[in-house]
Image (cartoon, grey):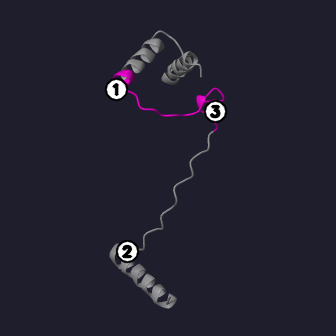
Amino acid sequence: MKLDKLASQLDSRQQGLEAVFGSAPEPEQPAPAPRSRKPATASKRTSWKMRAWYVKPETASRLTAYVNRQQEAGAVIDASDVVDQAITEWLGQQGG
């Protein structure tokens, strides 16, 4: 590889940019690293396993409506609580 040729091309490019824009553009700064937050101790992310399954649209709508009604009534609940309870009960019935 001819480094002198590459250096010459780079210098020509810089001169061309300076001629067009008045000066060479500043090099891009890397994006700041995201803050590393520790999850809240009561967060399900610390003790539960995240899984995803497909459900029928009607089932998803019924689950959302049920959770919303419970939350409006003052219950501290979310869909993962309901799904966990349902699966636990079903597995208990299956003997598993």
Instruction: Give left or right: position of 25 versus 87.
Output: left
What's the residue at 40%, 80% (across, down)?
13
Local SS, label 2: loop
Q: Which residues are magenta?
A: 38-60
Sequence-earlier tag: 1 or 2 = 2
Q: How far apart in space, not on screen, are marks 2 and 3 (Cα)?
A: 54 Å
What's the residue at 62%, 44% (across, down)?
36
Q: Position of residue 21 (x, y in %)?
A: 35, 73
Identify the residue under disc 3: 46
Identify the residue under disc 2: 22
Q: Amino acid at mark 3?
A: Thr
Specify the quadrant that holds the C terminus: top right
Instruction: Give left or right: position of 83 versus 23.
Output: right
Q: Position of residue 43 (x, y in %)?
A: 61, 28
Q: Amino acid at mark 1?
A: Pro
Q: Which mark is residue 57?
A: 1
What's the residue at 55%, 53% (across, down)?
32
Instruction: Give left or right: position of 91 versus 17.
Output: right
Instruction: Give left or right: position of 38 versus 74.
Output: right
What's the residue at 56%, 20% (across, down)?
91
Q: Amino acid at mark 2?
A: Gly
Of residues 53 and 69, the one drawn nearer to the viewer in this rendering:
53
